[in-house]
Amino acid sequence: TVFAASSLREPFIAIGELFEKRHGEEVVFNFAGSQTLKTQIEFGAPADLYAAANPMIIRPLVEKGLVGDVRYFAGNRLVLLLAGNRPPLRQLSELTADNLQIALGNSAVPIGQYTLRLLENLAGDPAFGAELVAGIRRNVRTEESSVKAIVAKVLLGEVDAGFVYASDLVDGVRAKTAHLELPAAHNPFVRYPAAVVSGSQHATAAQRFLDLLLAPAGQQILHRHGFLPAGSGDDR
Amino acid sequence: MSGFRLDIAFRRPHLALDVLLEIPPGLTLLLGPNGAGKTTLLRLLAGLEKPDDGTITSNDRTLFDAARGICLPPSQRRIGLLFQHLALFPHLDVRDNIGFGLRAQGIGKVERERSIAAIVARFALEPHIDKPVAALSGGERQKVALARTLAARPDVLLLDEPTATLDQENRWRFRAWLAEILAEWKVPTLMVTHDPADAASFRKRIVVLEGGRICQRGSFHQLLHAPATPFVADFAGVNFISGTIGTDNGATIFTSAAGTRLQAPFELSRSGPACLTVLPWEIALYRELPEGSPRNVVEGTVRDAIVLGDRVRVTLLGREKLVAEISLRGYQAMGQPGRGATLFAAFKAREARVENV
Amino acid sequence: MSGFRLDIAFRRPHLALDVLLEIPPGLTLLLGPNGAGKTTLLRLLAGLEKPDDGTITSNDRTLFDAARGICLPPSQRRIGLLFQHLALFPHLDVRDNIGFGLRAQGIGKVERERSIAAIVARFALEPHIDKPVAALSGGERQKVALARTLAARPDVLLLDEPTATLDQENRWRFRAWLAEILAEWKVPTLMVTHDPADAASFRKRIVVLEGGRICQRGSFHQLLHAPATPFVADFAGVNFISGTIGTDNGATIFTSAAGTRLQAPFELSRSGPACLTVLPWEIALYRELPEGSPRNVVEGTVRDAIVLGDRVRVTLLGREKLVAEISLRGYQAMGQPGRGATLFAAFKAREARVENV
Amino acid sequence: MSGSGWLFRFGMLLAAGFIALLILLPLFSLLLYADPARQLALLRSDETLAALRVTLTTSLLATGAIFVTGLPTAFAISRFNRKWRQLVDSLLELPMVLPQIVAGLALLLAFGRNGIFGRVLSAWGMQIPFSTAAVVLAIIFVLAPFFIRRTAVLFDQVDHELEEAAQLLGAGPFFGFRHVTLPLCRRPLIAEAIMVFLQSIGLFGAVILFAGNIPGRTRTLTLAIFDAFESNPEVAFALAALLLLVSLLLVLAGRLLLRNLDGGGK
Amino acid sequence: MSGSGWLFRFGMLLAAGFIALLILLPLFSLLLYADPARQLALLRSDETLAALRVTLTTSLLATGAIFVTGLPTAFAISRFNRKWRQLVDSLLELPMVLPQIVAGLALLLAFGRNGIFGRVLSAWGMQIPFSTAAVVLAIIFVLAPFFIRRTAVLFDQVDHELEEAAQLLGAGPFFGFRHVTLPLCRRPLIAEAIMVFLQSIGLFGAVILFAGNIPGRTRTLTLAIFDAFESNPEVAFALAALLLLVSLLLVLAGRLLLRNLDGGGK
Ligand SMILES: Nc1ncnc2c1ncn2[C@@H]1O[C@H](COP(=O)(O)OP(=O)(O)OP(=O)(O)O)[C@@H](O)[C@H]1O
Ligand SMILES: Nc1ncnc2c1ncn2[C@@H]1O[C@H](COP(=O)(O)OP(=O)(O)OP(=O)(O)O)[C@@H](O)[C@H]1O
Ligand SMILES: [Mg+2]
Ligand SMILES: [Mg+2]
C-alpha cells in the first residue's frame, strides 16, 4: 500500500500500472493530504510506502523511527498562474497594478510557506525590490488553505493571479489559463520525499516501488506530469 | 334581511349533503343520528370545506356563492364554531385561549382583559384561568372552548354538541346562559345536540338532518306529535310504526311492516304506505292479555324499565318496539316486571295517529 | 373474592383523592360534577398515575400495593379504559384499531379476525371497517373506541363518559348491549356519566365522587330519596335545601340558609344543621299566592319550563331554587307561564323530608 | 387583517424566492459547467463504478445502522426525565460541532492501532481503520447524534394518551413502540432517513482521515471528487453532477418503494 | 409479553450503549490528547480570538437568516398539494448530497466575479466572495435545505383542527402561523436552531472555497483548525477542544435564555 500526497495522484497511478506490469504485484494507493497521511501513519495505518509533498512533514516520522531512509524522488517549483479571461501579464511588476487580485497560500500550509519565501527572496533582490513585494501584498485578496483552492479560483477568474506549483498545470488547467515562470534564482525548490514505513509487511515491494520512482522510467512519468527531477535544484 | 341563509350541495363518496336552511337570530337546534353529516354541515358553513354548489349569506354578507365565485376564507366569515373535539390550543393557558380571538382581531390589551374577565366570570372559570388546558377536566375544557368561541363575538354561532360532556348542573347553567346571550345579542345560532333535554328547553326551532338531507323542521311540539322518521320519534320518545293502510273485509286497517294489525282514526288518511305514532303515556301495560278490550294490543318482552321520578319508562321488544310510560305505583303493583318479562301493551284506537308518507 | 377493590390516596396541589371502593361484577356508575376527579380516579386504577398510598386488587390479583412496593404496569393490569377523548390510533383504520389489543396480546390472525367481526357486527360498524378513524363522525368514533376496549377482553372495564356523544338510539343500544355483555361476562365495570338516563337504566349501584371523596353510594332510588349533597339532588332532579332545624315559639321549624321557613315532619330529626328535600312532582304551582293553605309556599320566577312528554318541568329561581313537575294540562291551564313569570310553589309539610347533616 | 394576510403572503414569497435563488442558481451553474459527454465516459470507467459501489454500500449500511441503533436510543432518551434529558442532549451536541477532520482524528485516537479501544481490538486481531467498516463507523459517528437528537424530539411530540391506550390494551413497551409511536412518526422518519442517507454520501473529512482513500474499499464518490479536484477540477464537476443524478434517482426510487409498501396510504 | 418487554429494554440498552461508546470514546480520547495549558495560551492569541469572532458572527447571522427565510418557506411548502410538494422536496434534496467542496464551487460559479449572478452584482460594484457575507451565504446554501425540509415535515404534523380554530377566531394566515403553528412546534424548532448553529460552526469545505480564508474576515475557527492541522496537528487538537468548549457554553447559555424567556413553561 502506497500512501501518497494527493498532488502525486496522476503520475503515481501511471507508475503503479508500470509497477504491476513489471513486478506482477498489486499496488494499492491511498491519496490524501500529506498531513492526513502522516497522522494516519502515526496511528498505525497499514502503509508500506509514504510519499509526501513536503520535506518538513516526514521529518517527525523519521525522528520517531516510523519510517526508514528518506529518498527524494521529485522536485517542484512555483509558477504564477494567470486567469485566462484577461490579457496575460508579461512580468512580475505588473502584479502591482490596481484592481488586480492575487491569491496566496496561507502561511500555515506548505504552498503559503514557499510563496512567502519566494516573496522574501524577491524583496532581497534589488532587481525587484521591497516595493514590488509590498505592491503584490497589497493586491492579495485571499490566503487559501490549499493550493487547489488557488487553482480553482484562478480557473474561475475569481482572482487574476495565484502562486501555485508547476505540477498543478495539468492539461485541463493549462487549456484555460496562462502562466508566468518565476525567476529561477529566487524560486524555492520543493523536494518530494518518500520512505518505506517501518514494520511494513511488504517492505521489499515498497522498496522496489521506491526504486522504480527513482529509476528513469519513473522519473520520466513524473516529468510528464510537470515535476522536476529531485536533483536539479537545491533545497533552499 | 338579518340572519343566516344557506342553500348548498356537497357531494362526496361517503356523504351527499343537500341543505337549504335559514337560521334566524336566536337558537336553532340541529338534530340527527350519528353520521348524518351534522359536523360536515357546520364545517361547510364555516368555510373549512367548500360546497360544490350553492350560496351562503350572513346578514346580507355573501360568504359563499358558487355561481359568482365568491368564497371568503374562514377568518373573514365571522363565524364562531365550537368543535366537537374542542381544538383548544395546548400551548396556551386558559386566559390566552379565551383571549385568542380578540387578539387575532387586533383588540387592545385593556379591552381584551375586560372581555376575558367578563366571560371567565360567567363560566365560573376563575380558578383555572392560569392553568394550561391539558390540566383541565373534560367538562372544564368544554367550558373553555365555549368561552373562547363566544369571546370572539361572532356573527353566527355554530355549536357542535356543546353540552355533551358537561354535568347536569353545568348543562342547565349553559342553557340558561345561552338563552340570555341570545336574547341580548340576537346572534343566529345553530346547535347540534343529542340531548332531548336541549330540545325540550329550546323547543321553538328544530331542524333534523338525516342522510345529508333535512327530513323535518318545526317546533319540538310538532316533532313530538308528527315525527317524520323513526329517528325523530325515537328522539322525542314517541312510538313510531311504519306500515300500510289497507282494507280487510271492508274495514280500514293499518298493517305494520312486521304484520301487526292496528286500529286508528282513519278519517284523514288514504290507503297506501303510512306511519302510525302513539305517545308513550297513552299506552297501558298488562301482565295478562286484556280480554274483551276494544283496544290495540301488542305483546313484547321488557328490554328495560327506567324510573323517571314518579314514572317508569318501559321499553318492550316484540314484533314492534314500543315505549310505554306508566306511573311508578302502577309499575310496582304489577310486581316490577324486569328485563325479559313478557307484557302486553294496549292503546285505544283514537290515541293513535296515522299519517300517509 | 371476585371483583375489584381499591383503597387509595392521591394528593396533588390541584386535587386530593381519597377513595375506598369495591366494584363487584356488573355495572357501577360513577357520578360527580365536572372536575371532581373522576377521570383522575380511572387513570389511577389503570396505572397511568401512581397513587401515593393504598392498594388495588383485581380478582385477587394485587395490581398495586404501596406498602409492598407492588405496582404493575398498565399493560399487565388487564384493565379496559375508554378514554374521555377516545385516543383512537389515527394511523390505523377501524379494523386495526379494534384488533389492536388482540394483536398486542399475541392472538392469532384467524381468531382475531373472528373476534373483530363479532364486535363490529354488534356495533353495526361494518360500513366503516376500512375507514381511517379521521373519516368517522363523532359518534362513530365513540363506538370504535368502545369496540376497541371491549375487544381486548379486559378483567375490569372503566368507561369515561361513553355515551356522551352518541345519539339517543345509539345510547339505548349501547346500554342494552352493555347490560347484555355484563350479564354474560360478569366483568366489574365502573362507568362515569353525566346522563341521568344512564343512572335511571343502571340504577342498582351508584357512587358519587365530589371533591376527591365519595360522598354517597347506593341505588338510584336511595339517591333520589335521600340525596346527600346538592349535586346529587340536582342530578336526581330532586329539590335540595340546606338550612337548620330550630324552634320558634315552641314549634319546630326548618329555616333555610336563605331564610325561608318551612314545615316538615320533624319526628326523626333533632335541632341543628339539616337539609330538606322534596320531589318535583310533589310540588304544585300557582299564579297567585294560594290562600289559607296549610302548605309551605315559596315564591320564584320561572327560569325555564321544559316539556317532557305530557309533563312540564318548571324551574323556579327565588330565595330557593325549586324544580316542579306538573302535568302539561295543568301548565296550559295556567296560561303557559314562560321565562320570567312569577309563580308560587307549594308543597305539603309531610311531602318534605328533613335529615340532619 | 386582510392587509396583514397579503403582507404575510408576500413575505413568504420573498423568503421562498430568496432561498430558491440561493439554491437553484449554484446548482444550475454547476450543471451548465459540466459536460455531458465526459460524464457518460466517466460513468463507464471502472474507477468511478467502484467508488459508486463503495458509496452506496457504506451509506446504506450506515443509514441502516443509524436507524437500528438510533431509534431505540432516541426512544429511551425521550422517556428520560428532565434532568437526565438535558445531560444527554448536551452530550449529543458535543460531536455535532466538531469539524469533520477533528472527528476523524478523534476516531483514529479511539479506534486506531494505538487508540484506547483500538489496542483492545488489535489484540483480538481486528483492525478498523482503512476498512469499509471504518467508513461506516465514521458516518455513524458524525450523523448519529443529529439523528438521535431530532428523533427524540419527534417521539416527545407523540400524543401520550395514544401510547397509554396501547399499554392498556395489553401492549408491552416494544409492541407499543413498534405499532404506535413509530408509525405515528412515519413521515418525518422517512424524511430523516433520506436526509441521513444523502448526508452520509457527501461526508468527507472524517472519512478520509479515519478510513483512508483506498480504491474499491474506502474510496467513496465524494473522495473521488476531491481527488479529481486536486488533479483536474473539470472531472470533479462531472463527478459531482453524476453524484447529484445518482442520489436523485435513488431518493426517487426509495420514495416510490415506500409509497407502494403502504399502498398509497395517508 | 413481559419477556418481550425485557428483550426490548435490553435491545434499547444495547443500542444506546453502542452509540454512547461510539460517541464518547473518540471524544474522550480527544480530550485526553489535548493539553490544557496550551489551550489557554491559544485562547489568548489574537488570531484565535479573531477566528472565534468570525465564527460566532457568521454562524449566528446564518442561523438567523436560515430561520427568517426558512420558516416561511417551510410553511408555504407544507401547505402545497401533494404533487407540488414532491417536486419541491426533490429539489431541496439536490443540494443535500453535494460534497461541501462542490457546493463551494457551485457558489463560486453562481456568485463569483464571472458567475451568472455575480456578473450582475459586480456590475453594481458588489462582490460577494471573500467577504464575511460569503461565509454566511455558504452556510445558508449548505444548511437551509435540511432545515426547510425538516421544518416543513414538522408543520405537516401540526393538528390541522387547531389551525382551523385559529382562523375561525379571526386569525389571518400570519397570526395563525405566528401564534398557533410556530409555538406548537416550539421544542423541535429550538432543537433545530441549536443544530443548525452547531453545524454551521463546523462547516468547512464550502466556506473555504467560496469565502476564502482571510484572517479577521472569513477565517473561522474551523478553518483555523484545518490550517493548524496542516502545519501543527497539536494546535489543531487544542483548537478543536476550544471549539467544543465554546459551543457547549453557547448552547447552554441559549437554553437558559430560552427557558427564562418562557418562564420555565412546559
Ligand atoms: N374524510 C372522510 N372520508 C370518509 N368518510 C367521511 C369523511 N368525513 C366524514 N365521513 C363520513 O361522513 C359521515 C358524516 O360525518 P359527520 O361527522 O358530518 O357526522 P355527524 O352528523 O356529525 O355525526 P355525529 O353525531 O356522530 O357527530 C359519516 O358517516 C362519516 O363517516
Ligand atoms: N396536571 C394538572 N394540573 C393541574 N390541575 C389538574 C391537572 N390534572 C387535573 N387537574 C385538575 O384536577 C381536577 C380533576 O380533574 P378530572 O379530569 O379528574 O375531573 P373529572 O371528574 O373527570 O371532570 P369531568 O366530568 O369534567 O371530566 C380538575 O379540577 C382539573 O382541573
Ligand atoms: Mg359530529
Ligand atoms: Mg373527566
Image (cartoon, coloured by chain):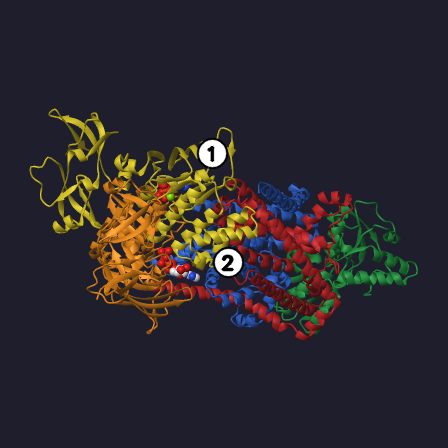
Chain colours: A green, B yellow, C orange, D blue, E red
Q: Is residue B252 visible?
A: yes
Q: Local crowd at mark 1 within 10 Å, few (<14), some, or many (≥20)?
A: some
Marking on residue E229: none
Q: Chain of mark 1?
A: B
Query: Within 10 angstroms of label 2, few (less than 14), some, or many (20 or more) residues?
Result: some
Identify the residue position indicated by label 2 in the image: D153
In the image, is residue A182 above or below residue B193? below
At label 1, the amino acid type is Thr
Q: Quadrant of the N terminus of chain C?
A: bottom left
The residue depicted at 29 percent of the width and 35 percent of the height is B222
Residue B57 disc label: 1
| Mark whose residue sits in front, 2 or 1 | 1
- Provide residue B23's location: percent of width, then percent of height: 41, 36
Report whether D129 appears left or right of C125.
right
Image height of D116 relative to A79, above or below:
below
The kind of residue on which mark 2 rests is Val
Q: Determine whether A64 is above or below B44 in the image.
A: below
Discs 2, 1: same chain: no
Q: Callout 1: helix, strand or loop? A: strand
Task: Name the one closer to the observer, B20 or D33.
Answer: B20
In the rendered image, the vertical position of residue C225 relative to residue E88, given as above or below: below
